Image: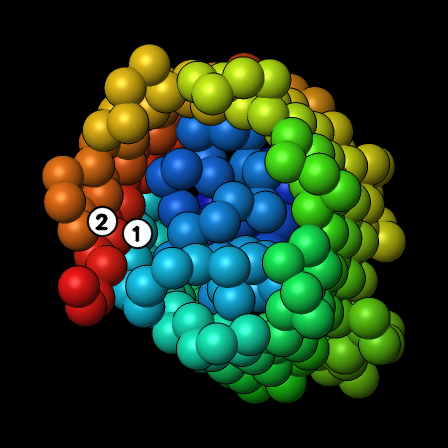
Amino acid sequence: MKTHTLVVLLILKGTTLKAIGHFSAIGAETAALGGIGFMSNYHSSSNHHALMPWLEKPGIACSMANYWGVKNLNQFNCSGVVPYKTFGYGFGLYNFGNADYAEQGVQLSVAHAFHKRLSVGLGANYNSFRIANYGHKSVFLIDASLAAKVNDKVMLAFKVFNPYRAKLNDYADERIQTVYSVGLQYKINAQVKSFVQLEKANAFQPNLKLGIDYSPKSFYHLRFGFSSIQPQFSFGAGFKHKKVVIDFASTIHPMLGINSQLSFAYAIGH
């Protein structure tokens, strides 16, 4: 019964087996903006690695999420980025679930900025899934991303996750979904940024995501978002003090309730 309940909840969340970190991008900043995945932060190594070379300092970020108040549906992520000249190097670790259903994974990524306005990235993911009484499976995946700064106000982003549809098992030729996403960031003024992202997985309807980031002062942000697939509304805030950034977010599901997420980031170096 517990396993059945977990699988039902995962389906309602908009996933298949594996997709926790890719249908739902990582970090409270992202969650508050409706799941917009192309945010430039230390979770970029997992969400949109093409942005890594444009970060000013190396750093690390950790995020903790709880889905609908169910203690067995907790997720933990840790990501890091090291920008070096025109390159960016990153890693990501995640863990989701409990003894009945669990996912773990590790990601390594690299990106290269050809100049200040164009960057491309490539990631490699090793993921493991386990369902009680059914066994476990490990699979290797890749993803690629691109980011282009059209001008000082507009940035375009594109990502494809698992383009070759890696096989999960031989039964019914079950495969992990390919996910495509394209996004636009528009800087309205010095205090407000707007985001639009369209995401499409093979077996799901397109998901339109909208987000607004309002920063009246440089040390804090207010964020609001929307995701069309269920639909869901989200909100959150972020606070910065010197090298430390703390973000939190809540997402409101129309049937299941509230998801909560908290992130902590630290910039390394002077």
Label at residue 213:
none
Identify the secondary structure beneath mark 2: strand
Q: How crowded is mark 1: few (under 14 residues within 10 Å), some or many (20 or more)?
A: many
Identify the secondary structure beneath mark 1: strand
Is residue 101 in view from this perspective?
no
Label at residue 63:
1
Label at residue 264:
2
Q: Residues within 10 Å of mark 2 (few under 14, many from 20)?
A: many
| For discs 1 and 2, the disc positioned in front in the rendered view | 2
Looking at the image, do the residues carrying marks 1 and 2 touch, with CB atoms under 8 Å apart? yes
* Outermost left residue: 241
Tag 2: amino acid: Phe
Left or right relative to 70: residue 49: right
* Viewer-nearest residue: 34 or 175: 34
Residue shown at 17%/63% (left/top)? Answer: 270
Residue shown at 62%/63% (left/top)? Answer: 50
Q: Position of residue 84 (x, y in %)?
A: 44, 77
Tag 1: amino acid: Ser
Q: Position of residue 13 (x, y in %)?
A: 57, 40
Q: Position of residue 34 (x, y in %)?
A: 55, 29
Q: In which quarter of the image is residue 189?
A: top right
Q: In which quarter of the image is residue 164?
A: bottom right
Q: In this view, does 57 lie above or below 35?
A: below
Q: How is the image coloured?
A: rainbow
Left or right relative to 75: residue 227: right
Q: Earlier in the sequence, mark 1 or mark 2?
A: 1
* Viewer-nearest residue: 91 or 52: 52
Residue shown at 63%/58% (left/top)? Answer: 116
